[in-house]
Image (cartoon, rainbow, N blue to C red):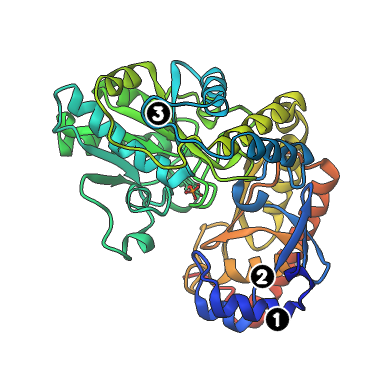
Protein backbone atom coordinates (compact mmCIF):
# COMPACT_ATOMS: atom_id res chain seq x y z
CA UNK A 1 0.00 0.00 0.00
CA UNK A 2 1.03 3.63 -0.33
CA UNK A 3 1.38 3.96 3.44
CA UNK A 4 3.94 1.16 3.53
CA UNK A 5 6.28 3.37 1.52
CA UNK A 6 6.30 6.17 4.09
CA UNK A 7 9.26 6.21 6.47
CA UNK A 8 8.60 4.65 9.87
CA UNK A 9 8.96 7.91 11.77
CA UNK A 10 6.31 9.51 9.57
CA UNK A 11 3.90 6.60 10.10
CA UNK A 12 4.53 6.79 13.84
CA UNK A 13 3.83 10.52 13.88
CA UNK A 14 0.51 10.04 12.05
CA UNK A 15 -0.39 7.24 14.42
CA UNK A 16 0.42 9.31 17.51
CA UNK A 17 -1.51 12.28 16.18
CA UNK A 18 -4.72 10.52 15.15
CA UNK A 19 -5.03 6.91 16.20
CA UNK A 20 -6.42 6.07 19.65
CA UNK A 21 -5.09 2.68 20.74
CA UNK A 22 -7.11 0.33 22.98
CA UNK A 23 -5.78 -0.20 26.51
CA UNK A 24 -2.88 2.20 25.87
CA UNK A 25 -1.78 5.49 27.34
CA UNK A 26 -1.74 8.10 24.58
CA UNK A 27 1.42 9.59 26.07
CA UNK A 28 3.25 6.27 25.65
CA UNK A 29 2.56 6.27 21.92
CA UNK A 30 3.66 9.88 21.52
CA UNK A 31 6.89 9.27 23.36
CA UNK A 32 7.91 5.87 22.03
CA UNK A 33 6.15 5.56 18.69
CA UNK A 34 4.21 2.41 17.82
CA UNK A 35 5.88 -0.50 16.10
CA UNK A 36 4.18 -0.58 12.69
CA UNK A 37 3.41 -4.10 11.49
CA UNK A 38 3.24 -4.25 7.72
CA UNK A 39 2.84 -7.92 6.79
CA UNK A 40 2.91 -11.43 8.24
CA UNK A 41 3.34 -15.05 7.20
CA UNK A 42 2.90 -18.16 9.33
CA UNK A 43 3.97 -17.15 12.85
CA UNK A 44 6.21 -14.30 11.71
CA UNK A 45 5.29 -10.60 11.67
CA UNK A 46 7.25 -8.07 9.65
CA UNK A 47 7.53 -4.42 10.73
CA UNK A 48 8.08 -1.25 8.74
CA UNK A 49 11.83 -1.53 9.32
CA UNK A 50 11.87 -5.00 7.79
CA UNK A 51 12.46 -6.75 11.14
CA UNK A 52 10.90 -10.20 11.62
CA UNK A 53 9.13 -10.85 14.91
CA UNK A 54 7.96 -14.23 16.18
CA UNK A 55 4.37 -13.71 17.28
CA UNK A 56 3.85 -15.60 20.52
CA UNK A 57 0.34 -14.15 20.89
CA UNK A 58 -1.30 -15.17 17.59
CA UNK A 59 -2.17 -11.51 17.09
CA UNK A 60 -4.45 -11.22 20.10
CA UNK A 61 -5.06 -14.91 20.86
CA UNK A 62 -6.73 -15.41 17.52
CA UNK A 63 -4.61 -16.12 14.41
CA UNK A 64 -4.60 -19.84 15.14
CA UNK A 65 -3.93 -21.07 11.59
CA UNK A 66 -1.12 -18.52 11.13
CA UNK A 67 -0.93 -15.47 8.90
CA UNK A 68 -1.12 -15.22 5.15
CA UNK A 69 -3.32 -18.18 4.21
CA UNK A 70 -4.35 -17.55 0.59
CA UNK A 71 -7.34 -19.93 0.83
CA UNK A 72 -8.96 -17.57 3.33
CA UNK A 73 -8.36 -14.54 1.13
CA UNK A 74 -9.81 -16.40 -1.87
CA UNK A 75 -12.95 -17.43 0.00
CA UNK A 76 -13.47 -13.87 1.29
CA UNK A 77 -13.04 -12.38 -2.18
CA UNK A 78 -15.42 -14.94 -3.73
CA UNK A 79 -18.06 -14.30 -1.07
CA UNK A 80 -17.74 -10.53 -1.50
CA UNK A 81 -18.40 -10.91 -5.21
CA UNK A 82 -21.32 -13.28 -4.76
CA UNK A 83 -23.09 -11.78 -1.73
CA UNK A 84 -21.12 -9.22 0.28
CA UNK A 85 -23.91 -8.64 2.76
CA UNK A 86 -27.36 -9.62 3.64
CA UNK A 87 -29.05 -9.50 7.01
CA UNK A 88 -30.40 -12.44 8.96
CA UNK A 89 -33.23 -10.57 10.71
CA UNK A 90 -36.81 -11.83 10.49
CA UNK A 91 -37.25 -14.49 7.83
CA UNK A 92 -34.17 -14.16 5.66
CA UNK A 93 -31.04 -16.22 5.80
CA UNK A 94 -28.07 -17.04 3.61
CA UNK A 95 -25.90 -20.05 2.94
CA UNK A 96 -22.70 -19.01 4.79
CA UNK A 97 -24.60 -18.25 8.04
CA UNK A 98 -26.75 -21.37 8.03
CA UNK A 99 -23.85 -23.64 7.07
CA UNK A 100 -21.61 -22.15 9.76
CA UNK A 101 -24.38 -22.55 12.36
CA UNK A 102 -24.72 -26.22 11.34
CA UNK A 103 -20.96 -26.75 11.53
CA UNK A 104 -20.72 -25.15 14.98
CA UNK A 105 -23.61 -27.32 16.20
CA UNK A 106 -21.66 -30.40 15.03
CA UNK A 107 -18.45 -29.33 16.73
CA UNK A 108 -19.95 -28.06 19.99
CA UNK A 109 -20.39 -30.58 22.81
CA UNK A 110 -23.70 -31.89 24.12
CA UNK A 111 -26.89 -30.33 22.86
CA UNK A 112 -25.40 -26.93 22.03
CA UNK A 113 -27.08 -26.90 18.64
CA UNK A 114 -28.11 -23.28 18.09
CA UNK A 115 -26.04 -20.27 17.15
CA UNK A 116 -26.68 -16.56 17.60
CA UNK A 117 -24.05 -14.57 15.70
CA UNK A 118 -22.24 -11.43 16.89
CA UNK A 119 -19.25 -9.38 15.76
CA UNK A 120 -16.81 -10.50 18.42
CA UNK A 121 -16.59 -11.81 21.96
CA UNK A 122 -17.75 -8.71 23.84
CA UNK A 123 -21.05 -8.34 22.06
CA UNK A 124 -21.63 -12.11 22.10
CA UNK A 125 -21.42 -11.81 25.88
CA UNK A 126 -23.89 -8.92 25.75
CA UNK A 127 -26.18 -11.30 23.89
CA UNK A 128 -25.66 -13.84 26.67
CA UNK A 129 -26.72 -11.41 29.38
CA UNK A 130 -29.96 -10.60 27.57
CA UNK A 131 -30.47 -14.21 26.50
CA UNK A 132 -30.23 -15.77 29.97
CA UNK A 133 -32.39 -13.07 31.55
CA UNK A 134 -34.98 -13.47 28.80
CA UNK A 135 -34.82 -17.25 29.21
CA UNK A 136 -35.66 -17.07 32.91
CA UNK A 137 -38.32 -14.41 32.34
CA UNK A 138 -39.98 -16.65 29.75
CA UNK A 139 -39.91 -19.46 32.30
CA UNK A 140 -41.86 -17.24 34.69
CA UNK A 141 -38.85 -16.62 36.90
CA UNK A 142 -38.00 -13.00 36.00
CA UNK A 143 -36.40 -12.50 39.41
CA UNK A 144 -33.63 -14.85 38.33
CA UNK A 145 -31.45 -12.17 36.79
CA UNK A 146 -28.13 -12.22 38.64
CA UNK A 147 -25.08 -13.46 36.79
CA UNK A 148 -22.10 -14.53 38.87
CA UNK A 149 -18.64 -14.05 37.43
CA UNK A 150 -15.07 -13.91 38.73
CA UNK A 151 -12.67 -11.18 39.70
CA UNK A 152 -9.95 -10.92 37.07
CA UNK A 153 -12.04 -12.75 34.50
CA UNK A 154 -12.23 -11.05 31.09
CA UNK A 155 -15.39 -11.01 29.02
CA UNK A 156 -14.95 -7.98 26.77
CA UNK A 157 -15.03 -4.21 26.59
CA UNK A 158 -18.64 -3.34 25.84
CA UNK A 159 -20.78 -2.18 28.77
CA UNK A 160 -22.10 -5.72 29.17
CA UNK A 161 -18.84 -7.53 28.51
CA UNK A 162 -16.82 -5.30 30.82
CA UNK A 163 -19.51 -5.61 33.51
CA UNK A 164 -19.33 -9.39 33.33
CA UNK A 165 -15.53 -9.21 33.47
CA UNK A 166 -13.89 -8.78 36.82
CA UNK A 167 -11.26 -6.23 35.83
CA UNK A 168 -11.41 -3.52 38.48
CA UNK A 169 -9.57 -1.01 36.30
CA UNK A 170 -12.32 -1.38 33.69
CA UNK A 171 -15.12 -1.04 36.24
CA UNK A 172 -13.54 2.20 37.39
CA UNK A 173 -14.19 3.86 34.04
CA UNK A 174 -17.71 4.47 32.78
CA UNK A 175 -19.76 3.49 35.79
CA UNK A 176 -19.60 -0.30 35.68
CA UNK A 177 -20.68 -2.96 36.37
CA UNK A 178 -24.33 -2.83 35.37
CA UNK A 179 -26.72 -4.06 38.10
CA UNK A 180 -27.11 -7.77 38.69
CA UNK A 181 -23.52 -8.92 38.25
CA UNK A 182 -21.78 -10.49 41.26
CA UNK A 183 -18.23 -11.74 41.65
CA UNK A 184 -16.28 -14.50 43.35
CA UNK A 185 -12.50 -14.88 43.52
CA UNK A 186 -10.44 -16.41 40.74
CA UNK A 187 -8.75 -19.83 41.07
CA UNK A 188 -5.21 -18.41 40.97
CA UNK A 189 -3.37 -20.85 43.23
CA UNK A 190 0.12 -19.49 42.64
CA UNK A 191 -0.74 -15.97 43.74
CA UNK A 192 -3.41 -16.65 46.33
CA UNK A 193 -3.22 -20.31 47.36
CA UNK A 194 -1.07 -19.75 50.47
CA UNK A 195 -0.44 -23.02 52.31
CA UNK A 196 -3.26 -24.91 50.61
CA UNK A 197 -2.53 -27.59 48.03
CA UNK A 198 -3.76 -26.66 44.55
CA UNK A 199 -6.52 -29.27 44.93
CA UNK A 200 -7.75 -27.85 48.25
CA UNK A 201 -7.56 -24.33 46.89
CA UNK A 202 -9.45 -25.26 43.71
CA UNK A 203 -12.30 -26.69 45.79
CA UNK A 204 -12.33 -23.72 48.14
CA UNK A 205 -12.53 -21.24 45.28
CA UNK A 206 -15.29 -23.21 43.54
CA UNK A 207 -17.25 -23.37 46.79
CA UNK A 208 -17.30 -19.59 46.89
CA UNK A 209 -19.88 -19.97 44.13
CA UNK A 210 -22.18 -21.92 46.44
CA UNK A 211 -21.68 -19.36 49.21
CA UNK A 212 -22.47 -16.55 46.80
CA UNK A 213 -25.61 -18.33 45.53
CA UNK A 214 -26.84 -18.78 49.10
CA UNK A 215 -26.06 -15.14 49.92
CA UNK A 216 -28.03 -13.87 46.90
CA UNK A 217 -30.76 -16.49 47.12
CA UNK A 218 -30.74 -19.37 44.59
CA UNK A 219 -34.06 -18.22 43.15
CA UNK A 220 -32.37 -15.00 41.99
CA UNK A 221 -29.36 -16.47 40.22
CA UNK A 222 -29.57 -16.84 36.43
CA UNK A 223 -26.10 -18.02 35.43
CA UNK A 224 -22.43 -18.39 36.19
CA UNK A 225 -19.88 -17.33 33.57
CA UNK A 226 -16.20 -18.21 33.38
CA UNK A 227 -13.38 -18.81 30.94
CA UNK A 228 -12.26 -22.46 31.10
CA UNK A 229 -8.76 -20.99 31.44
CA UNK A 230 -8.60 -17.25 32.17
CA UNK A 231 -6.67 -15.71 29.31
CA UNK A 232 -6.44 -11.93 29.59
CA UNK A 233 -6.26 -12.32 33.38
CA UNK A 234 -2.85 -13.97 32.95
CA UNK A 235 -3.45 -17.54 31.67
CA UNK A 236 -4.56 -18.86 35.05
CA UNK A 237 -4.87 -22.64 34.67
CA UNK A 238 -7.24 -23.70 37.46
CA UNK A 239 -6.52 -26.64 39.76
CA UNK A 240 -8.08 -29.92 38.51
CA UNK A 241 -10.67 -29.85 41.31
CA UNK A 242 -12.09 -26.47 40.32
CA UNK A 243 -14.36 -26.94 37.31
CA UNK A 244 -15.99 -30.24 38.36
CA UNK A 245 -17.05 -28.54 41.61
CA UNK A 246 -18.38 -25.50 39.72
CA UNK A 247 -20.37 -27.86 37.49
CA UNK A 248 -21.76 -29.71 40.52
CA UNK A 249 -22.90 -26.45 42.12
CA UNK A 250 -24.51 -25.12 38.92
CA UNK A 251 -26.36 -28.43 38.52
CA UNK A 252 -27.48 -28.47 42.15
CA UNK A 253 -29.09 -25.01 41.94
CA UNK A 254 -30.26 -25.27 38.32
CA UNK A 255 -28.06 -22.34 37.29
CA UNK A 256 -27.00 -21.92 33.68
CA UNK A 257 -23.30 -22.36 33.01
CA UNK A 258 -21.78 -20.04 30.41
CA UNK A 259 -18.30 -21.01 29.22
CA UNK A 260 -16.53 -18.08 27.62
CA UNK A 261 -14.52 -19.91 24.97
CA UNK A 262 -13.34 -16.80 23.13
CA UNK A 263 -9.69 -17.75 23.73
CA UNK A 264 -9.96 -21.45 24.61
CA UNK A 265 -12.18 -22.39 21.65
CA UNK A 266 -11.04 -23.92 18.37
CA UNK A 267 -8.03 -25.89 19.47
CA UNK A 268 -6.15 -23.64 21.86
CA UNK A 269 -6.12 -26.32 24.58
CA UNK A 270 -5.89 -29.26 22.16
CA UNK A 271 -9.64 -29.94 22.03
CA UNK A 272 -12.23 -28.05 20.05
CA UNK A 273 -13.29 -26.30 23.24
CA UNK A 274 -11.72 -25.61 26.61
CA UNK A 275 -14.92 -26.97 28.22
CA UNK A 276 -13.94 -30.41 26.90
CA UNK A 277 -10.44 -30.06 28.34
CA UNK A 278 -11.92 -29.04 31.71
CA UNK A 279 -14.68 -31.67 31.59
CA UNK A 280 -17.67 -29.32 31.86
CA UNK A 281 -21.02 -29.21 30.09
CA UNK A 282 -21.98 -25.58 29.52
CA UNK A 283 -25.46 -24.40 28.54
CA UNK A 284 -23.98 -21.56 26.49
CA UNK A 285 -20.56 -21.05 24.94
CA UNK A 286 -19.23 -17.67 23.83
CA UNK A 287 -16.92 -17.95 20.81
CA UNK A 288 -15.00 -15.43 18.68
CA UNK A 289 -11.28 -14.97 17.88
CA UNK A 290 -10.24 -18.48 16.68
CA UNK A 291 -13.61 -18.91 14.98
CA UNK A 292 -12.25 -16.91 12.03
CA UNK A 293 -8.59 -17.07 13.13
CA UNK A 294 -8.85 -13.30 13.37
CA UNK A 295 -9.01 -12.83 9.60
CA UNK A 296 -12.34 -11.02 9.93
CA UNK A 297 -14.42 -10.10 12.99
CA UNK A 298 -17.07 -12.60 14.08
CA UNK A 299 -18.36 -14.00 17.35
CA UNK A 300 -21.28 -16.11 18.49
CA UNK A 301 -23.24 -17.56 21.36
CA UNK A 302 -23.78 -21.29 20.95
CA UNK A 303 -26.74 -22.36 23.07
CA UNK A 304 -28.53 -25.51 24.20
CA UNK A 305 -31.71 -26.99 22.72
CA UNK A 306 -33.60 -25.99 25.86
CA UNK A 307 -32.52 -22.33 25.74
CA UNK A 308 -33.18 -22.06 22.00
CA UNK A 309 -36.64 -23.57 22.49
CA UNK A 310 -37.61 -21.15 25.27
CA UNK A 311 -36.13 -18.11 23.50
CA UNK A 312 -37.74 -19.25 20.25
CA UNK A 313 -41.19 -19.02 21.84
CA UNK A 314 -40.90 -15.24 22.03
CA UNK A 315 -39.42 -12.48 19.90
CA UNK A 316 -35.89 -11.97 21.20
CA UNK A 317 -35.50 -8.23 20.62
CA UNK A 318 -31.82 -8.39 19.95
CA UNK A 319 -29.44 -8.55 16.98
CA UNK A 320 -26.59 -6.84 15.22
CA UNK A 321 -26.56 -5.59 11.63
CA UNK A 322 -23.62 -7.90 11.08
CA UNK A 323 -25.02 -10.94 12.94
CA UNK A 324 -23.97 -13.75 10.61
CA UNK A 325 -22.12 -11.52 8.14
CA UNK A 326 -21.73 -13.64 4.99
CA UNK A 327 -18.05 -12.85 4.43
CA UNK A 328 -17.20 -13.55 8.07
CA UNK A 329 -19.18 -16.80 8.04
CA UNK A 330 -17.54 -17.97 4.80
CA UNK A 331 -14.10 -17.20 6.23
CA UNK A 332 -14.94 -19.02 9.48
CA UNK A 333 -16.07 -22.10 7.54
CA UNK A 334 -12.83 -22.11 5.57
CA UNK A 335 -10.84 -21.69 8.78
CA UNK A 336 -12.65 -24.67 10.36
CA UNK A 337 -11.96 -26.71 7.21
CA UNK A 338 -8.25 -25.92 7.53
CA UNK A 339 -8.22 -26.81 11.24
CA UNK A 340 -9.83 -30.17 10.45
CA UNK A 341 -8.07 -31.13 7.24
CA UNK A 342 -4.63 -30.14 8.48
CA UNK A 343 -5.15 -31.95 11.79
CA UNK A 344 -4.23 -28.82 13.70
CA UNK A 345 -5.77 -30.05 16.97
CA UNK A 346 -3.66 -33.22 16.84
CA UNK A 347 -0.61 -31.02 16.24
CA UNK A 348 -1.46 -29.07 19.41
CA UNK A 349 -2.15 -32.22 21.44
CA UNK A 350 0.71 -34.42 20.30
CA UNK A 351 3.46 -32.25 18.86
CA UNK A 352 3.59 -28.52 19.56
CA UNK A 353 1.78 -28.62 22.94
CA UNK A 354 4.05 -31.23 24.57
CA UNK A 355 7.16 -29.56 23.10
CA UNK A 356 6.14 -26.13 24.37
CA UNK A 357 5.34 -27.60 27.79
CA UNK A 358 8.78 -29.18 28.07
CA UNK A 359 10.65 -26.06 26.92
CA UNK A 360 8.43 -23.63 28.83
CA UNK A 361 8.70 -25.46 32.14
CA UNK A 362 12.50 -25.18 31.88
CA UNK A 363 12.02 -21.45 32.39
CA UNK A 364 10.89 -22.15 35.97
CA UNK A 365 14.61 -22.51 36.82
CA UNK A 366 15.20 -18.87 35.94
CA UNK A 367 15.82 -16.66 39.00
CA UNK A 368 12.98 -14.33 38.00
CA UNK A 369 10.35 -17.01 37.40
CA UNK A 370 7.93 -18.50 39.91
CA UNK A 371 5.58 -20.86 38.10
CA UNK A 372 5.78 -21.68 34.38
CA UNK A 373 2.71 -23.51 33.08
CA UNK A 374 1.17 -24.51 29.79
CA UNK A 375 -2.11 -26.11 28.71
CA UNK A 376 -2.19 -26.93 25.02
CA UNK A 377 -0.72 -23.83 23.42
CA UNK A 378 -1.52 -21.25 26.06
CA UNK A 379 0.89 -20.59 28.85
CA UNK A 380 2.19 -18.16 31.40
CA UNK A 381 5.04 -17.48 33.74
CA UNK A 382 4.76 -15.61 37.01
CA UNK A 383 7.62 -13.20 37.65
CA UNK A 384 8.68 -12.95 41.27
CA UNK A 385 11.54 -11.64 43.38
CA UNK A 386 11.19 -14.66 45.71
CA UNK A 387 10.22 -18.10 44.41
CA UNK A 388 9.97 -19.67 47.86
CA UNK A 389 7.35 -17.27 49.21
CA UNK A 390 5.77 -16.51 45.79
CA UNK A 391 6.02 -12.86 46.76
CA UNK A 392 5.02 -9.97 44.49
CA UNK A 393 7.48 -7.19 43.72
CA UNK A 394 7.72 -4.09 45.89
CA UNK A 395 7.39 -1.99 42.73
CA UNK A 396 3.89 -1.25 41.37
CA UNK A 397 2.27 -4.36 39.87
CA UNK A 398 3.13 -4.56 36.17
CA UNK A 399 6.38 -2.59 36.37
CA UNK A 400 8.58 -5.66 35.97
CA UNK A 401 6.17 -7.32 33.53
CA UNK A 402 6.33 -4.23 31.34
CA UNK A 403 10.13 -4.27 31.33
CA UNK A 404 10.10 -7.95 30.43
CA UNK A 405 7.66 -7.34 27.60
CA UNK A 406 9.86 -4.55 26.27
CA UNK A 407 12.91 -6.85 26.32
CA UNK A 408 10.92 -9.51 24.44
CA UNK A 409 9.87 -7.01 21.80
CA UNK A 410 13.46 -5.79 21.46
CA UNK A 411 14.48 -9.42 20.93
CA UNK A 412 11.82 -9.80 18.26
CA UNK A 413 9.28 -11.97 20.03
CA UNK A 414 5.78 -10.98 21.10
CA UNK A 415 4.91 -11.97 24.65
CA UNK A 416 2.32 -9.93 26.54
CA UNK A 417 2.37 -9.07 30.21
CA UNK A 418 -0.59 -9.06 32.55
CA UNK A 419 0.67 -7.32 35.65
CA UNK A 420 3.79 -9.31 36.43
CA UNK A 421 2.72 -12.46 34.58
CA UNK A 422 3.96 -13.09 31.06
CA UNK A 423 1.53 -14.86 28.75
CA UNK A 424 1.81 -16.68 25.44
CA UNK A 425 -0.66 -18.13 22.96
CA UNK A 426 1.15 -18.64 19.65
CA UNK A 427 -0.54 -19.64 16.40
CA UNK A 428 -1.51 -23.31 16.70
CA UNK A 429 0.52 -24.15 13.60
CA UNK A 430 3.80 -23.17 15.27
CA UNK A 431 6.55 -25.76 14.68
CA UNK A 432 8.87 -27.23 17.32
CA UNK A 433 11.80 -25.34 15.76
CA UNK A 434 9.88 -22.08 16.10
CA UNK A 435 9.02 -22.93 19.71
CA UNK A 436 12.75 -23.40 20.38
CA UNK A 437 13.55 -20.01 18.86
CA UNK A 438 10.77 -18.45 20.93
CA UNK A 439 11.80 -19.97 24.26
CA UNK A 440 15.48 -19.17 23.69
CA UNK A 441 14.61 -15.55 23.03
CA UNK A 442 12.25 -15.50 26.02
CA UNK A 443 15.09 -16.70 28.26
CA UNK A 444 17.41 -14.03 26.88
CA UNK A 445 14.71 -11.42 27.53
CA UNK A 446 14.26 -12.67 31.10
CA UNK A 447 18.05 -12.40 31.63
CA UNK A 448 18.04 -8.83 30.35
CA UNK A 449 14.99 -7.96 32.45
CA UNK A 450 16.67 -9.35 35.57
CA UNK A 451 19.83 -7.41 34.83
CA UNK A 452 17.85 -4.21 34.44
CA UNK A 453 15.71 -4.56 37.55
CA UNK A 454 18.82 -5.43 39.61
CA UNK A 455 20.51 -2.30 38.27
CA UNK A 456 17.37 -0.26 39.04
CA UNK A 457 17.20 -1.70 42.56
CA UNK A 458 13.69 -3.14 42.10
CA UNK A 459 14.48 -6.87 42.31
CA UNK A 460 12.92 -7.02 45.73
CA UNK A 461 9.78 -8.30 47.41
CA UNK A 462 6.91 -6.18 48.68
N1 LIG B 1 -14.11 -13.08 26.22
C1 LIG B 1 -12.85 -13.46 26.36
C2 LIG B 1 -12.55 -14.69 27.17
C3 LIG B 1 -11.81 -12.77 25.75
O1 LIG B 1 -10.55 -13.15 25.91
C4 LIG B 1 -12.14 -11.65 24.97
C5 LIG B 1 -11.08 -10.86 24.30
O2 LIG B 1 -9.91 -10.99 24.61
C6 LIG B 1 -13.47 -11.27 24.86
C7 LIG B 1 -14.44 -12.01 25.49
C8 LIG B 1 -13.87 -10.07 24.07
O3 LIG B 1 -13.80 -10.37 22.73
P1 LIG B 1 -13.72 -9.17 21.63
O4 LIG B 1 -12.46 -8.43 21.94
O5 LIG B 1 -13.72 -9.93 20.34
O6 LIG B 1 -14.92 -8.35 21.78
Give the numbered dot on residue 119.
none
Give the SS element for disc 3: strand
Q: Quadrant of residue 145?
A: top left
For the residues labelled 3 and 2, the Cα–Cα distance comes to 38 Å
Instruction: Judge depth for marks 2 and 1 and give the one in front.
Output: 1
**How busy is the neighbourhood of tag 3: few (under 14 within 10 Å), some, or many (20 plus)?**
many
Q: Is the distance from the Cβ of mark 1 to the nearest ligand 1 atom less than 8 Å?
A: no
Q: Which quarter of the figure is the N terminus placed in? A: bottom right
| Residue designated by label 2 | 406
Q: Is residue 223 left or right of residue 198?
A: left
Give the SS element for disc 1: helix
Of callouts 3 and 1, the N-terminal one: 1
| Residue designated by label 1 | 10
Query: Where 456 falls versus 131 (above or below)?
Result: below
Query: Where 157 falls versus 144 (above or below)?
Result: below
Q: Nearer the viewer, residue 294 or 214?
A: 294
Give the SS element for disc 2: helix
Q: Is residue 254 left or right of residue 291?
A: left
Q: Nearer the viewer, residue 399 or 310?
A: 310
Query: Percent from the top left, x then y, of residue 144?
Result: 18, 32
Q: Quadrant of residue 311?
A: top left
Instruction: Judge depth for marks 3 and 1 and give the one in front.
Output: 1
| Residue designated by label 3 | 284
Query: Percent from the top left, x then y, of residue 360?
Result: 71, 47
Q: Is residue 180 left or right of residue 361?
A: left
Amino acid sequence: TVANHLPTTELQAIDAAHHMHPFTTGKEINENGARIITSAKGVWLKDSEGQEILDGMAGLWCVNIGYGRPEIADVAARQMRELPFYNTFFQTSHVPALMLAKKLAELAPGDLNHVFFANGGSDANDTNIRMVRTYWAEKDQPERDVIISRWNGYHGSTIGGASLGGMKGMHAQGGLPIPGIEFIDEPNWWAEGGDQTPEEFGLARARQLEEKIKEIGPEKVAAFIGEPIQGAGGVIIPPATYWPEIQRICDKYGILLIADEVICGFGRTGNWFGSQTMGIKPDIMTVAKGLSAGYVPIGASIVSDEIAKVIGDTEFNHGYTYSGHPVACAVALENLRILEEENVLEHVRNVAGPHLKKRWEELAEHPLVGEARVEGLMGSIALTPDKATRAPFAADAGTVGYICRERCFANNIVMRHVGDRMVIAPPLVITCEEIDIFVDRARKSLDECLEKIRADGIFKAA
